[in-house]
Amino acid sequence: MNTILKGIAKAKEVVSVKSKVNVGVIGFGTIGSSVVKLLLERRRFFRERTGIELNLSMVCDKDLKSRRDVNVPKVMLTKDADRVINDPEIDIVIELIGGIHPAKEIIIKSLCAGKHVVTANKYLLAAEGNDIFKQAEENKRQILFEASVAGGVPIVKAIREGMVANSFSSIFGILNGTSNYILSRMSTEGSSFKSVLKEAQSKGYAEKDSSLDIKGLDSAHKLAILSFLAFGKRVSMDDIHVEGIEKISSIDIQYAAELGYVVKLLAIAKRYGRELEVRVHPTLLPSDNLLSSVSGIYNAIFIDADLVGKQVFYGEGAGRLPTASAILSDIMGLAYTICYCNESNKYVAPDRAEIKKIRKMDDVRARYYVHFSAIDKPGVLAQIADLLGRHGISISSVVQKERRADQIIPIVMLTHEAREKDMQDALKKIDKLKTIKRKSVLMRLER
């Protein structure tokens, strides 16, 4: 055994071209300062664990006056991103400024300058990923993005490496902690959407402008990344049907609970042969579903694949330390490549032929929860059932709630599986009935 270990150690010495990797960070905000702090404070920890010296060379930000909880020598600080990009000693550039511009230009310039790149920028990858991945391929550099989906949950690496031999059939994800916190609080407290959003903002779980979170766009960006990794299809934002949670009321969450369901903002990718459907919307899940118990700011991703079967990944989807952990994982992965491989592995795979088409939302089939607000009058339910029947939609169950003070009766209905277009066409006609007083509420069901 000693002989084998000595042989491995000797082989590593021969293969290794360097033992120190220089890192430059662009973006010194909340996440950037956490990454910088860990690179400085855990340098010895990383060296003892991996044999590699991770050396923080430079930190760039437009604002160098604001106080952070880490002290960086002034000689390492700069406001000029080009100093980081063009420094011949820097091996890896960490982009943490967010947004599209100038983040895209910084990443592309870094790749062209021969740097590997780590980013947490899901918005950029979802919107401009094609251009960025093309530059990575042309320059034979890697761009890693574990922190772009589900924070500290290592879902990107799990799909790309751990399940590389699998063919995926579906991915369901609770991918936004802000929305999940709001829905969880509305469920347990019966509070309104607006009051819980205010609470989430006061606790720092939601930004002052939380529109990306509550409108489902943040989840859609992450779904685009997961769809590419799992199904080999570059999905544009225009391909993804997106609905947020801003119109969900506590009364519908209560009605769903009485029927045995929990409401979650779900990101869904399903494969049907060579078609892929991708959608983000509030979804009713059975209360015994594993994702139904995911509450607060936590994220969870359910995967169904042919070899590993059903898998669930769970953890904090945001926050300084979980995100920094994911970024450092990518940095160390690149450091191994730089020190022991002599050449870059191609982590960004080309489009695969397995998916030919994105399914239109009109053609999606699902079961539905519908809440009608009707006048207390004989024959109303018969009118609704008739219009649904004419569009090929059959009713699974129906509950008529007690009359409200405004003389409106809530009618809550679950349907059997139907086509989206048929359901939407039926609802348009039902909402035009004189006996229906408010726009009907529709949510889809998943198992």
Image (spheres, rainbow, N blue to C red):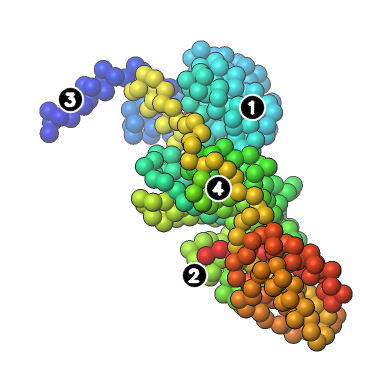
Query: Residue 45's x, y, as percent?
Result: 38, 34
Sooner in the amino-acid sequence: mark 4 or mark 2 = 4
Q: Estimate the x, y position of residue 124 in percent, counting from the top left.
A: 63, 34
- The residue indicated by pointer 2 is 288
Residue 104, label in figure: 1
Between circles 4 and 2, the one closer to the viewer is 4
Residue linked to disc 3: 7
Mark 3 and mark 2 lie on one chain; the one further toward the N terminus is: 3
Q: Amino acid at mark 1?
A: Lys
Closer to us: mark 3 or mark 1?
A: 1
Tell me which amino acid carries mark 3: Gly
Mark 4 or mark 3: which is in front?
4
Q: Is residue 245 left or right of residue 154?
A: right
The CA distance from mark 3 to mark 1 is 44 Å
Earlier in the chain: of badge 3 and badge 1, it is 3
Please report whichever mark, 4 or 1, sits nearer to the chain's N-terminal start.
1
Q: Secondary structure at mark 3?
A: helix
The answer for how far apart the CA atoms under marks 1 and 2 are is 43 Å
Of pointers 1 and 2, the one earlier in the residue sequence: 1
Give the residue number, with chain letter if any, for mark 4.
Answer: 276
Mark-to-mark CA distance, 4 and 3: 48 Å
Q: What's the CA distance linking mark 4 and mark 1?
A: 28 Å
The residue lying toward the viewer, choosing from 308 and 188, is: 308
